[in-house]
Image (tube, grey):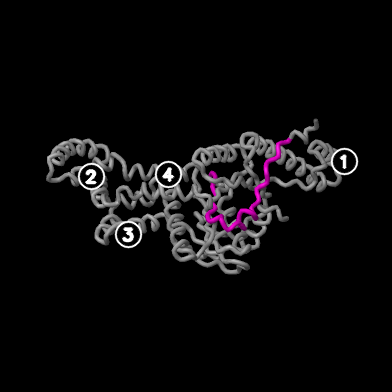
Amino acid sequence: MSGASKRLVAPKLDIDALIDDPRTRIIVCCGSGGVGKTTTAAAVALRAAEHGRRVCVLTIDPARRLAQAMGLTELDNTPRQVDGITGGSLSAMMLDMKRTFDEVVESHSDPERAEAILSNPFYQALSSSFAGTQEYMAMEKLGQLRAQSDSEGLWDLIVVDTPPSRSALDFLDAPERLGSFLDGRFIRILTAPARGAGKGIGRILGAGFGLFAGVLTKVLGTQLLADLSAFVAAVDTMFGGFRERAEATYALLKDSGTAFIVVAAPERDALREASYFVDRLDEDQMPLAGLVLNRVTRVRAPGLSPDEATAAAQRLSQNGEHRDVAALLGLHADRMRDAERQRRLAERFTAAHPHVAIAEVYALPEDIHDLEGLRVIGDLLADAV
């Protein structure tokens, strides 16, 4: 049996079939940071729109050129229409993490309590930089967009670009972490004296809390503890809401109308992260459409082996002639070896996940800076070039 016949071939990810299916209501592009999730999400959204869908794409921290490509020179937390679309329609927005958190507070509190929360220094730090907040708020915004879509009929497809986390799993884990913190035992202890005031148990807890607060003061500092105590007193009415909405979004993500696209570069760490994420989606019974293998090295003369190219380049260099040709042969040899290394890594992924469909996107010579560039990415995703 030849070496070629032993190669593992993954099923083909049919992007067009996915976006053309009216039952597909949400597409989530996920993966570790730096693998091209934002560009992939934008290209999928654009292709779906030009196939006749009414699309809203939620991007996370897009590069300036990509934002300009979509006409989003003024990004905010509200979807904006993208011009130059034929067929359907495309709206795009960039997640404003803090603004989304503020909206949650405002919608679940009376004005006086909301103002107390929004002006609290602990809340301001929590909403801006607490680990996992961006991932949680991405899910909050997805829930808001889906509810708006259902009530107003604005879009029939929402494409989500997940935050650029070190780990792809952060997107699924962060809501539980943040919900557990805000609805957890530590917060309950801090609010127990206020909630139990005037009752026998409240007096006991109040006395115990005095000792507990003394320890916390040494650990956290007087001002931080005061800010934290004021925050939990103001936010008490919101307890349970974070966990409930996280559970509701989880149910939405597990719905048959949702499709996850895992994005990875053909590198060891990125594919290992993708493998972990695929296993997690399977464990949580969430619908996986497939894997996009991004920035794959393209070889235009596969019949010329790297050894042959290297030998020919050395002969030309020794003769002192055709130095440009020798350089091109050397470059070809390097690209062939790189492509072979990427192929082995991809086969290792397929061996572990033989049923995961894959679409490959070749590395382009320059960054995407307009809609035409996004169309090229869409064509590569759909294997239409």
The answer to whether marks 2 and 1 mark residues whose Cβ atoms lie closer than 8 Å is no
Disc with the residue nearer the chain's start (2 vs 1):
2
Q: Is label 3 in a helix, a strand or a loop?
A: helix
Say left or right for 350 vs 105: right
Say left or right for 8 vs 101: right
Disc with the residue nearer the chain's start (4 vs 2):
4
Tell me the residue that label 4 is attached to: 174
Along the viewing direction, whichever of 164 and 278 lies nearer the viewer: 278
Residue 29: horizontal and vertical position, in percent?
Answer: 55, 50
The Cα–Cα distance between marks 4 and 2, rounded to whole angstroms, is 23 Å
Q: Is residue 260 visible?
A: yes
Kindly identify the residue that appears in the image at 78 percent across and 33 percent down.
Answer: 3
Residue 361: horizontal and vertical position, in percent?
Answer: 66, 49
The answer to whether marks 4 and 2 mark residues whose Cβ atoms lie closer than 8 Å is no
Tell me the residue that label 1 is attached to: 319
Kindly identify the residue that appears in the image at 62 percent across and 58 percent down.
Answer: 20
Mark 2: which amino acid? Thr
Q: Is label 1 in a helix, a strand or a loop?
A: helix
The answer to whether marks 3 and 4 mark residues whose Cβ atoms lie closer than 8 Å is no
Disc with the residue nearer the chain's start (1 vs 4):
4
